Amino acid sequence: MSRADEILIGNLQDILQNGVSDEGYNVRPRWEDGTPAHTIKIFAMVNRYDLSREFPICTLRRTAFKSAIDEILWIWQKKSNNIHDLSSHIWDSWADESGSIGKAYGYQLSVKHHYAEGEFDQVDRVLYDLRHNPRSRRILTNIYNHHDLSEMGLYPCAYSVTFNVSGNRLNAILNQRSQDMLVANNWNVVQYAVLVHMMAQVSGLEVGELVHVVADAHIYDRHIPLVRELLEAKPYPAPRFVMDKSVTDFYDFTPDSFRLEDYQFNTFDHKIPVAI
């Protein structure tokens, strides 16, 4: 099985066996029928993926590789907060009539800040430091801006990335306040694994580890039967990740710059209910 499968199986089993339920408490999320969406959760889930050894995509069911990349480019490259710049419809529920999700995600990364070297937004500052100050311990982004939270369609879930170079290897820590394990876990892992590959390539570095830290890792009540079924699925070896090596500018990547070879996965035909 892939390393991503192994980690996800362990996470899901841990939550099912040891998770704490919020049944009986007042919760914000709701199902489409208005029913409270309760969860079972574990606190402070930490997973490590060595990107130099294997690309961390699950095979227990298909992760939509190109759609995941399209979203990470929407946030980090386009720095957009408008769903009309996004190919999928995953943000439709959070957008206003103009398509905006407010001052969230890409908007926060696009804001320029003053440094001794000049004006940079958060993405361009990371790219600058990886090329000019790779030994720095200050290479990070943070989009959880308390001043703007009231103007966001959704508070950021994956809110901070710390980049750190060890030798010639680029490592990263992704901090996430909350995660729907069935719907979003491997989606986010795939996205930020691709982001580390992109950052490394354009900075003349090799990929190292992605460490994923989730404060509230949960399974929704209506997802529990689906998770149990998923845990019975047959896993496959990880596919081979291929990236266009000719790209040297971060802003030249497109979803077609990446592909997977020999990606085998199980069919999982269920329509997964989404809490909002």
Image (cartoon, grey):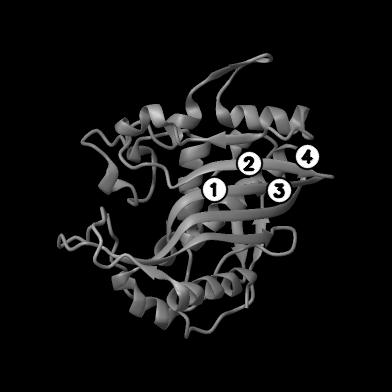
Q: Mark 2 to mark 4: distance in Å?
A: 18 Å
Identify the mark at residue 204; answer none if there is no mark.
4
Amino acid on which disc 3 is placed: Asn
Residue under circle 3? 171
The mark nearer the N terminus, 4 or 3, is: 3
The mark nearer the N terminus, 2 or 1, is: 2
Image quarter (top left, top right, bottom left or bottom right) of the C terminus: bottom left
Q: Secondary structure at mark 3?
A: strand
Image quarter (top left, top right, bottom left or bottom right) of the N terminus: bottom right
Amino acid on which disc 1 is placed: Asn
Residue under circle 1? 175
The structure residue drawn at horizontal position 43% and vertical position 71%, both measured from the top left corner, is: 19
Q: Nearer the viewer, mark 1 or mark 4?
A: 1
Asked if residue 101 lies left or right of residue 108, the reply is left
Classify 211 as above or below 98. below
Amino acid on which disc 4 is placed: Gly
* Residue 36 image point, x, y percent: 21, 62
Amino acid on which disc 2 is placed: Thr
